[in-house]
Image (cartoon, rainbow, N blue to C red):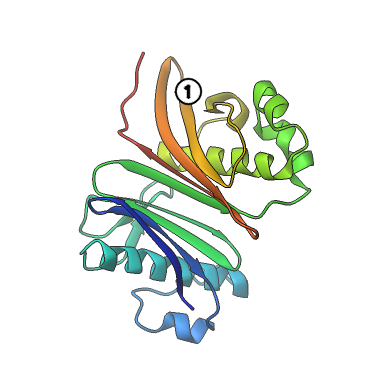
Amino acid sequence: MPLNFFFKDGFQSGWALWRIEETEAQLTSDIIGLPPPEITNEKKRLEWLAGRHAIMALCNHVGLRYFGICKDAFGKPFLEKYPHSISLSHSFPYVAAQIDKTRVVGIDIEQPREKLLAIAPRILSSSELLDAGKDVTKLCIYWCAKEALFKVHGRGSLFFSQHLIIESFSLSDKGALTGHIVNGRAIQEVAMSYRVEKEYVLVTGTSEAKSRQ
């Protein structure tokens, strides 16, 4: 079953979730491009292909013809022939994709795991660590949100614990988040939302790409 979930949140804007159940041969059909030869891991190749199918499905849902994906100098993906912002994430067997015509987007999907307890002090601020405590699901939401912020920024050179900040929130099955990208004196606010499922946590973010001093 390819497209597992589709959510439309505006004109030519939305996100999709793909659960990989196909073989590489099945995913290779009807897609533009093949995985780069340096991707030799089977799961990574499936994720690469499923990501293209997810973006292609999003294009179909919002009325665009899919011509393929390219990347800029920072590795940020973009659509051929269109100005739309796109974002991709994967945590096998799931692949998530997001698109928006006017806003910059970032999406991330992860599976809550105990290893986050060890990783958290390196990626969360002290206030975020205090808010999350030992709750692996909440830690995973923070992690996904920061990854999504990083993709919205799209240019690297940021530390997760210092420059990507998530306001505290109450844990639920789904909800809203507010993120901030702190780059020097400029602070970019990003509206975000999260959803918690049995097998994964998913966070999306959208920004008008405006900064305040």
Q: Residue at x 65, y 44 (%)?
A: 140
Q: Can residue 133 be seen in the rendering of this structure?
A: yes
Kind of residue indicated by mark 1:
Val
Q: Residue at x 24, y 43 (%)?
A: 102
**Left or right side of 196 for 119:** right
**Left or right side of 166 for 69:** left
Task: Provide residue 174's location: percent of width, then percent of height.
Answer: 53, 45
Pick the residue in front: 67 or 176.
176
Query: In the picture shown, does residue 83 fall above or below 6?
Result: above
Tell me the SS state at disc 1: strand
Pick the residue in front: 138 or 21.
138
Pick the residue in front: 41 or 166.
166
Neighbour class for label 1 at 10 Å: few (<14), some, many (≥20)? Answer: some
Task: Provide residue 88's location: percent of width, then percent of height.
Answer: 45, 56
Q: Please tell me how many numbered marks the rendered image carries.
A: 1
Query: In the picture shown, does residue 20 fall above or below 146?
Result: below
Q: Can residue 150 be seen in the rendering of this structure?
A: no
Task: Provide residue 193's location: percent of width, then percent of height.
Answer: 47, 42
Task: Provide residue 9's location: percent of width, then percent of height.
Answer: 32, 49
Q: Residue at x 32, y 32 (%)?
A: 209
- Write down the residue under mark 1: 182
